[in-house]
Image (cartoon, rainbow, N blue to C red):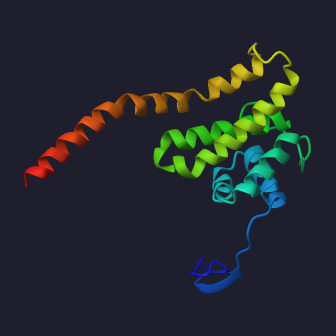
Amino acid sequence: ANGNGNTSTTLVNGSSTKFIVKAATSDSLVILLRQALLANDDSQLEVALQVSDKRVIENSILELSRGGYDSGSSTAKDGTGSSGSGEVIVVLLTKLVTRISRKPARAQQLSFWIRTVLVALLSSNSSANEDGFSMGKAERDIASRLAPLRSMLSERVESLPALLRLEGRLGLIGKQF
């Protein structure tokens, strides 16, 4: 996209083609996410994850968790063996956690996505689990899928004191010169 964000130029077979770039809507994002997750298409998922409008993301995740815009009864290729809305949203969480674990620099971009998916998952599971204290199979599955994120965060927290000491030493050295 160019500076104004309204048009984009693409080279196709050596010729330049201009097209209008439109902002994503909740409807289009739900469809894109569902197709990407059911087909296990990481490049299509990356396109969806470029959306940064928080309202569009929230509405899309909510609709996806409700099973909106269901594309039929195809089987997910992620090994879950099902394409129900709960499984799709859990697959999205897994893919988000994998991406943030591989590239922690994407944390700011992906943290809102993860938060929104967790809220959708936990709100749908809390209505099924009235007492709120026992951890059911779904909650244990979510917790296990969050393990890489938890490990990464624990490593970062453990390294903070050493980084702060280093910052202090560098500050002292900087004052000497």
Q: Which residue is drawn at 92% across and 45% down?
A: 72
| x 84%, y 58%: residue | 27
Name the residue rendered at 35%, 34% in the picture.
160
x and y, in percent, of residue 162 in the image: 28, 32
Q: How many labels does the image show?
A: 0
Above or below residue 4? Residue 49 is above
User: Residue 120 location in percent, x, y?
Assistant: 77, 38
Q: Say above or below: 153 vs 57.
A: above
Which residue is situated farthest in the left direction here?
Answer: 177
Report which quarter residue 74 is drawn in: top right
Q: Quadrant location of the N terminus?
A: bottom right
- Is residue 107 left or right of 27 when viewed as pictured? left
Depth order, front residue of 20/55? 55
Residue in view at x 73 percent, y 22 percent:
139
User: Relative to 161, does residue 67 appear above or below in the rendering?
Assistant: below
> Residue 106: horizontal and vertical position, in percent?
51, 50
Residue furthest to the top: 134
Say which quadrant the C terminus sits in: bottom left
In the rendered view, tell whether residue 97 sits above or below residue 140. below
The quarter holding residue 138 reads top right
x, y percent for residue 6? 67, 80
Q: In the depicted view, which residue is nearer to us: 52 or 164? A: 164
Q: Residue furthest bottom?
A: 15
Residue 155 appears in the picture as rendered: yes
Query: Can residue 83 be seen at all in this image of the molecule?
Result: no
- Relative to 146, 151 lies left or right: left
Q: In this view, does 46 lie to the left or right of 108?
A: right
Residue 114 location, quadrant = top right
In depth, the one of 154 and 18 nearer the eye is 154
